Amino acid sequence: MRSSNPILRDSVYENTYAITERPMTVAGTMNKLLILTVVMLLAAAAVYYQFSLHHFDFVMLMVKGGAIVGLITAIIIAFKTNTAPYLSPVYAFAQGAAISGISCFFESAMPGIVIQAMSLTFIVVLAMGILFRTGLVKATERFKAVILTATFAIAIFYIISLVLMLFNVNIPYFTSTSPLAIGINIAIAIIAALNLIIDFDFIEKGARTPLPSVFEWYGAFGLLVTILWLYIEILRLLSRLRNR
């Protein structure tokens, strides 16, 4: 079994774990996701408060710092799953600060866009959950392989773009409102949404295996990564549509 989400790697199933504690459950994973969400919202609220005080330089520092800390912790957790209970709250706090800052700047330029993006993200997550639960969309091997390829292609594109931007090389995609840019944005958002199906599948099968309860944090972390990615893509898409 393969997972297209590089965080929720299915290689964990290929190892043997001596379960000496409570096993992983779906409910337990959702509880951990709730905890991470609360941590993220606390950080987001703090950054929003600073933005309301017009401390824009501080907010930008939080955006950059949060993004860097989030990336580092995500990489560590991805390769050291036993760190998930300790580092996933750090990731949630860092990303909450970074994404809150980004959202504040979007909202100041386009009032109402953040609540729209949050609402659409919630609707998409709910829809993917229903599609998975009813079996209308199944995480088959072919499905996972396609999403895996697309996800890594997008990741490579973003990494290359980030490196180029560090050298002050302009990437037209990020500022363009052309039909092509909008189409690419929609495609990326769809890939992000489909990753949710595989995230749900990982969590369900992890509970059925069962894996140790530490993987509740790991599964919640991976799901949060996908949800935040989806939110950013929806936010970017809405801003393009408004600018047109």
Image (cartoon, grey):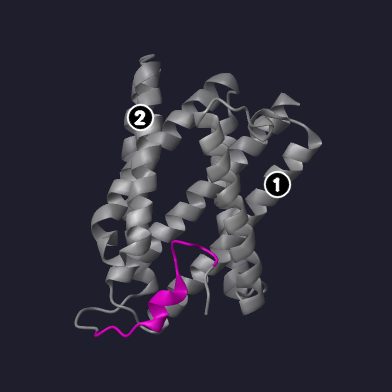
Residue 17 belongs to the span the image colors magenta: yes
> For the view shown, which residue lies furthest in the top direction?
54
Magenta region, main secondary structure:
loop
Lower sequence index among marks 2 and 1? 2
19 lies above or below 33? below
Three-letter code for the amino acid on which mark 2 is drawn: Met
Q: Give the percent coordinates (x, y) of residue 47.
A: 35, 28
| Element under disc 1 | helix
Separation (CA) of disc 2 from disc 1: 28 Å
Instruction: Name the amino acid, label 1.
Output: Ile
* Residue bearing the label numbered 1: 186
214 or 122, which is in the foreground?
214
Q: Residues within 10 Å of mark 1 (few under 14, many from 20)?
A: some
At 37% from the left and 54% from the top, the residue drawn is: 75
Q: Name which quarter of the figure residue 215 lies in.
A: bottom left
* Residue most extreme to the left: 20
* Number of numbered discs: 2
Residue stretch rendered in magenta on the structure: 4-18
Residue occupying the point 52% across, 37% down: 162
Numbered label attached to residue 62: 2
Instruction: Residue 209: give x, y in percent of width and height.
Output: 39, 84
Q: Secondary structure at mark 2?
A: helix
Q: Is residue 40 in view?
A: no
| Left or right relative to 88: residue 149 | right
Residue 119 coordinates in the image, percent (x, y): 57, 43
**Few, some or many C-alpha atoms within 10 Å of disc 2 (few <14, some 14-19, many ≥20)?**
many
Q: Which mark is residue 27?
A: none
Q: Is residue 41 magenta?
A: no
For image coordinates 35% across by 15% down, the residue present is 53
Quarter holding residue 231: top right
